[in-house]
Amino acid sequence: MKVNSTVAVVRCQSYDTLEVNECIKCLFALLGGVEKFIQHGSRVLIKPNLLTDTEPDEATTTHPEVVRAVIRALKSAGCHPFVADSPAMPVQLEKIWEKTGIKTVCKEEDVPLLNLEKDGVRQFNIAGRFSFSIARAVLEADAIINIPKVKTHMLTVLTCAVKNMYGVVPGYQKTTLHSRYPTAYEFSELLVEIYKVARPVLNIADGIVGMCGDGPSAGKKIALGFLAGSPDGVMLDIAICQILGIDPLSVPYLAQFLKGKDSQFYSSFEITGDLIRKFSRKEFELPTSIVRRVIPGGIARAVSRWVWIRPVFMDNCIRCGRCVSVCPAKALTLTDDENHRLQKPQLDAKKCIECCCCHEICPEQAIKMEPSPLLRLVWKRKLE
Ligand code: SF4
Ligand code: SF4
């Protein structure tokens, strides 16, 4: 079968600057060199995952040392890199830049760090079904290098190359699109369209330390020990699924790509570089929301009264209100009790679209997404 794409994998055990630099050089060499993808003198957008204001070692965002190594590789090839991402709202961008370490790296490497909200957007309407806007700064770059973090995701099971490009949609539109495309499958169709419009020339996944369990922000850190890259983000995500023991068909956006493909498809890409051991299910835990995948979308809608996964608020909630602001369905409110003390958020279950945005944005990991009793029962039966 014709090989359409290459995925390169390089073992990398730490975020030591020298080690990451060497590994990134090695990754580029395996893929044919920077020049194969980007012309000398190009303005290149480096798109990390800057989800929220967390420290690099929390494994929620792309590690700044990986970004540094890519900047250096691009500069050596005569390119002009700049860095940008539009994080999940509602957190101040400056705070995210500082806490994630990205501001320091950009300053030290003397590259611009752009605010994608500033220079306007271009509106897209795809076949009358999908409408979204993308930041002009993204579209005006000569090339994009996407640097996702390898993590689980409560809505999409995995977040890596394809999902990371959702960050080119600026600001609050990211959350409002959830209400327009409420199910995981509808939302994944949207992700695929966005990825096609803002297609990176290269994707490099930061899998040195990733996140499993209830990602993308409240999961468990896990040392995975690799960097992986490919010009094809879909193939990269499928290869990473294979390493992590995730069925690609359980990742709704990959299921979109794999529709109608037979098993031969898996031999249409080659994996080169270091052999990385595969992780067992016990080691790399899936998000608890995976229970939602046992009932197909259409059926789930028909029985939605009994089949759901909804947020529950824990006692460590600090009443910051981020979840209330981010909720696209306006299903959450913060109210005072009779003594004028702020209470934990209240959920209007009828409005909840189960997007998990509140869970993703909570800085205290004070939200658990709880499946309905019926869903728990179905899942238990499946495991028996
Ligand atoms: S649940 Fe989390 S995000 Fe919501 S108010 Fe409490 S601490 Fe803030
Ligand atoms: S309450 Fe949470 S899961 Fe439900 S719609 Fe709002 S953000 Fe999404």
Image (spheres, grey):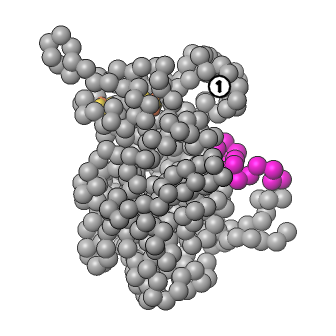
Residue 184: image location, x then y, percent: 59, 39
Question: Which residue bears the numbered disc 1?
Answer: 301
Residue at 57%, 43% (x, y): give it. Answer: 187
Q: How many marks?
A: 1
The reply to whether residue 336 is visible in this rendering is yes
Identify the element where label 1 is drawn. Answer: helix
Is 12 rendered above or below residue 349?
Answer: below
The reply to whether residue 245 is visible in this rendering is no
Tell me the quarter of the picture where residue 109 sits.
bottom left
Residue 294 painted magenta: no
Q: Amino acid at mark 1?
A: Arg
> Residue 11 or 310: which is nearer the viewer?
310
Give the residue at the far top of this rendering. Answer: 338
Residue 144: image location, x then y, percent: 50, 71
Residue 258 painted magenta: yes
Residue at 40%, 77% (x, y): give it. Answer: 81
> Residue 17 or 5: which is nearer the viewer?
5
Mark 1 crowdedness (10 Å alpha carbons): few <14, some 14-19, many ≥20: some
User: Ligand 2 appears in which quadrant?
Assistant: top left
Q: Is residue 301 left or right of residue 64?
A: right
> Residue 241 or 330: which is nearer the viewer?
330
Q: Quadrant of the C terminus?
A: top right
Is 117 rendered above or below residue 331?
Answer: below
Residue 323: image location, x then y, percent: 35, 34
Q: Is residue 213 left or right of residue 270?
A: left
Q: Is residue 38 left or right of residue 363?
A: right
Tell me the quarter of the picture where residue 228 sits.
bottom right
Residue 260: image location, x then y, percent: 81, 50
Residue at 17%, 19% (x, y): give it. Answer: 341
Is 378 rendered above or below residue 298?
Answer: above
Magenta-tinted stretch = 244-262
